[in-house]
Image (cartoon, grey):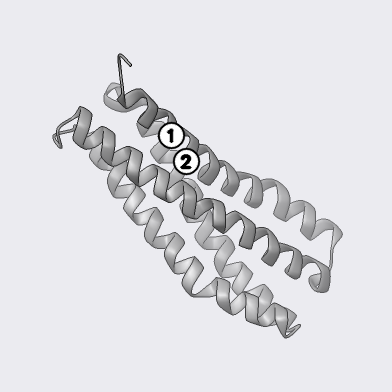
Amino acid sequence: MKYPWAFAIALHQLGTIVWVGGMFFAHLILRPAVNARLGPPERLPLMQLVLERFFRWVWIAILLLWASGSWVFLGVYGGRAGMPIHAMMGIAALMTLVFLFIRMRPYPRMKTAVAASDWPAAAAQLGVIRRLISVNLILGLVTAVVGAAGPKL
């Protein structure tokens, strides 16, 4: 293979597509459609199941992104990359922390509220999740732009 790190970059792109694309779809397409058609007793259990499945893929995406990004950072750049790479890594660290917070705090609370049919509490936790996903979506889109444009910015 002429460029062994090309595989790492492809894995990196796949991780980005899964995570950022999933947030884009869930936040801007699925959520408004579900809100328009379903009341809390149907909507909140559905969103809890959607998030459960999506979060499994986010774990995989995070592993892919950190592993492939580290491979390129250390293998290609020898740990001495320019500002765009450092910016992507910093934003990725922040996105990972935001995801971990979502997964460890509001999501379990939402899941508990859904199981108890406490729709106001479940909706409140989903609102927190929605706002944090909005933050991560913006960060992810900025990171994708930085990654695509890189040093040409």
Looking at the image, residue 136 lies above or below residue 72: below
Amino acid bearing label 2? Gly
* In the displayed structure image, the side of residue 64 where residue 121 appears, left or right: right
Q: Secondary structure at mark 2?
A: helix
Which residue is found at the position 54% from the left and 62% from the top? 131
Residue at the spot of label 2: 15
In the image, residue 69 above or below residue 31: above
Q: Quadrant of the C terminus?
A: top left
Camera-side residue of 60 and 125: 60
Pointer 2 and pointer 1: residues touching (CB < 8 Å)? yes
Residue 109's quadrant in the figure?
bottom right
Report, in whole angstroms, how far the alpha carbon at label 2 lies from the one at label 1: 6 Å
Which quadrant holds residue 106? Answer: bottom right
Report helix, strand or loop for mark 1.
helix
- Write the residue at 18% across / 33% down: 81
Within 10 angstroms of label 1, few (less than 14), some, or many (20 or more) residues? some
Q: Position of residue 11 (x, y in %)?
A: 43, 34
Coordinates of residue 5 in the picture (x, y in percent):
31, 26
Image spot of residue 99 (x, y percent): 45, 60
Which of the numbered marks, if any, corresponds to residue 11? 1
Residue 36 sits above or below residue 151 on the image = below
Q: Is residue 77 above or below residue 129?
A: above
Tell me which amino acid carries mark 1: Leu
- Determine the residue located farthest toward the front in the rendered image: 1
